[in-house]
Image: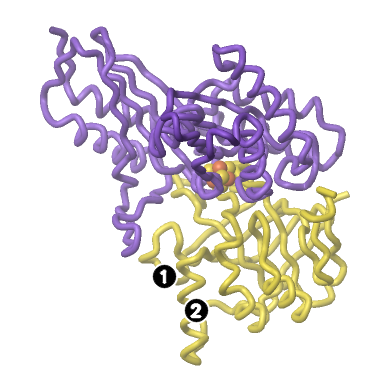
Amino acid sequence: MREINVFEITKAVRNLCINSNYYLSQDVKDRIKEAFNNESSSMAKDILEKILKNIDIAKNEDMPACQDTGMACVFVEIGQDIHIVGGDLEDAINEGVRQGYIEGYLRKSVVKDPLNRVNTKDNTPGVIYYDMVSGNKLNITVAPKGFGSENMSQIKMLKPADGIEGVKEFIIEVVRDAGPNPCPPIVVGVGIGGTFDKAANMAKRALIRPLSEKNNNKFYRDLEDEILEEINKLGIGPQGFGGKTTALAVNIETYPTHIAGLPVAVNINCHVTRHAHIEL
Amino acid sequence: MEKKISLPLTYDKVKQLKIGDSVLITGVIYTARDAAHKRLVELLDEGKSMPIDVKDSIIYYVGPAPAKPGQPIGSAGPTTSYRMDPYTPRLLNSGLRGMIGKGLRSKEVIESMKKNGAVYFAAIGGAAALMSKSIKKAEIVAYEDLGSEAIRRLEVVDLPVIVVIDSEGNNLYEISQN
Ligand code: SF4
C-alpha cells in the first residue's frame, strides 16, 4: 500500500493557499479578456482593464489579487489504496492553512465562533471535504472563498412542479438581488438536486470547475449557456455600473433527488475565482 | 477625464463631484470596517471623542492583507459597504465627508449624505493589488486588537475611485442599470 506522510500534505496545502491567492488561473483571465473585448461602454472596459492589470500586478509581485484571501475551502480526494502516515490528516491540512496564510502574508479572516467573534489569527480552520475514490493518489484542491460574494449566495427548496423555469427564475433572482455587492463580473455555481446540503455542496464544487469547461451533459450545458445569457442581459455589468458582463460563467452540477423535491443552491463567486490543485 | 481631489474634502469640493466621475484621491484617509464602526459609534453614544477626526475626511472600508517586509501595506481593495450602513449616519453627522467601498447603501445613509453634503465612492472590488500601489504609508491609529480591521491612517496618492452616490443623492447603480 502506498504511504503518504502528513508532512507532505501540510506542505502541499501551504503552497496551494499561497499560489491560489497570488496567481489567478488562465481560464479566469481568458474569460475576463474576452469580456473586455466584448464590452462597448468605456466605464465597463476601464474596469475590466484594471481588473486584468490587477491580476498581473498580483502575479508579478507575489501578492494576493484580493485582500479578502477568503476562508480556505479544501477538497481532498483520497484514493482508497493509500495509507496516510505520520499524524492526523485534518491537523496536517489545517497546519498547511496556517503556514500558508502566515508565510504568504494572506489576510486572516476567520473567527473562532460565529457569535463570539474572536479571530483565530491564522485563518484556521479550513472548510475541508473528503471524498474516497479509487486508486492510490491523493488530490487536493484549495479554493479560498471571499465573503463579499459568499454572502450573496442562496438556497431554495423548489417544488418539482416549479421545473426548469422555476430553477432559471431562482438563479436569476439571486444574481439580481446580489447586484453590485459580490464584485461582478461573477461566477455562478449552481447545485441542483440531492438534499439540502448536497445541493449547497455541489454549488461550491461547481465553482472549482475551470471556466473553460462546460457540464458534460448536453442538456445542462445548454442550460448553463442559456442562463449565462439571461444573466448578462440584466445589465448589472462590471462592478454594477452597467454593461454586458455581469457573469463570466454559470457552472451547474446535478445529482439524483427525491420524488418530492427540487433543491437548488446558488453559490456566487467574484471575478477573483481562485483554485489551485495538486496530485500527490 | 479623471478628476483629482485632495484632502481635506471640504463641502465645496464634494459639491463638484457628480456620479460617474472617475476620481484620483490624494492625502490622508482612514480605514474602518464593521467592528471599528461599532466601537466609534459606541464612543459617540457615551459622549466621548473618537480616536480619529472624521471632519472633512474619508473612511475607506478595507481590511488590508498584511504588508510584506518593505511594503507599506498588502493588497487593499474595498469591502462591501452595506454592513456599515447602521453606523454611517452617525459619522456623517460628525462631519465625515466621504466613504470608499463597494455596493449598495441604505436609504437612511443616502438621506444623511444629502443632509450633510457627503459623497460615496466605489473602488474596484477585487482590484486590491492595484489599489495598494496608491497607498504610500499606513499606520495603525486605533483598535490594534482588531488586526486587519484596526483603524489605519493611510497616505494615498492618486487612489482610483468612482463617484457612485453624490451629495444630491444621485445613484450611479440605479442609473446605469436602467
Ligand atoms: S467578493 Fe471577491 S473580489 Fe470582492 S472583495 Fe470579496 S474576495 Fe475580493
- Is residue B89 shown left or right of residue B45? right
Name the image quarter holding the C terminus of chain A.
top left
Indicate yes or no: mark 2 CB to ligand 1 under 8 Å.
no
Which residue occupies the extreme bottom position in the image?
Answer: B47
Q: Is residue A39 above or below residue A235?
A: above
Q: Which residue is mark 2?
A: B51
How many marks the image carries: the answer is 2
Q: Please tell me which residue lies in front, B99 or A143.
A: A143
Name the image quarter holding the N terminus of chain A.
top left
> Picture coordinates of residue B26 (x, y %)?
71, 60
How packed mark 1 is, by other alpha carbons closer than 10 Å (few <14, some 14-19, many 20 or more), is some
Q: Which mark is residue B143?
A: 1
Residue type, numbered disc 2: Pro
Q: Residue at x 76, y 55 (%)?
A: B24
Chain ID at mark 1: B
**Residue A280 appears in view:** yes
User: Does the CB distance between marks 2 and 1 fall below 8 Å?
Assistant: yes
Q: Is residue B164 above or below residue A236?
A: below
> Picture coordinates of residue B120 (x, y %)?
72, 64
Where does ligand 1 appear, by image quarter?
top right
Q: Colour of chain B?
A: yellow
Indicate yes or no: mark 1 CB to ligand 1 under 8 Å.
no
